[in-house]
Image (cartoon, grey):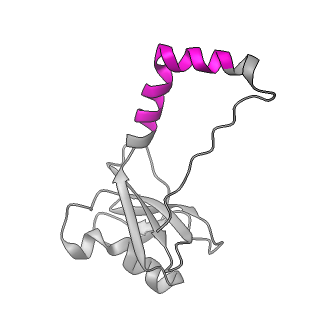
Amino acid sequence: MRWIITADHIGTNSHGVGDDENGKRVQTFVTAGDPLSYDFRLYDDDGNLYYEGRTNDINEDEERAFAPLDWARHMAGCTYMTYRQHGLHNAAFEAHHAQAYTQAVYRQYEDWLAAPVEIVFMQPVA
């Protein structure tokens, strides 16, 4: 796979849409062996998240790097995309919460707070 949509937030039945290694449009699923090393998000000009996906073409030529945005512009009017290395956020989060001092604070929360801690991941706003 070159890129694939992993989440469709606007209900266009686009989960699994992407381009294969030859640039052919397909509808499939990410498998463990796919070298899709970057996560991307596609937004409209108001900053609304429409799609999320994975790619391995960010460092390729412009046409391949922006192929998901070109598709989403035609499909739903998306105007920009963001990307990050896949797993980077999760790895940093897990490393932080594995630290002894973080675990000690969470144990204290049991006495300090009226309800269990709920972690809500924030999304950047343009």
Q: What residue is at 44 percent from the left and 83 percent from the top? A: 73
Q: Does residue 63 show up magenta in the picture?
A: no
Q: Does residue 103 show up magenta in the picture?
A: yes
Could you tell me residue 1's position as x and y percent? 35, 59
**Could you say which is closer to the camera, residue 56 or residue 50?**
50
Q: What residue is at 50 percent from the left and 55 percent from the top? A: 29
**Could you say which is closer to the camera, residue 20 or residue 98?**
98
Could you tell me residue 20's position as x and y percent? 35, 65
**Could you say which is closer to the camera, residue 72 or residue 30?**
72
In magenta, the rendered stretch is 90-108
| Quadrant of residue 46 within the rendered picture | bottom right
Could you tell me residue 90's position as x and y percent? 46, 38
In the rendered view, tell whether residue 23 sits above or below residue 76.
Answer: above
Is residue 93 left or right of 114 when viewed as pictured? left
Could you tell me residue 49's position as x and y percent? 55, 68
Residue furthest to the front? 112
Is residue 115 left or right of 58 when viewed as pictured? right
**Could you say which is closer to the camera, residue 50 or residue 115?**
115
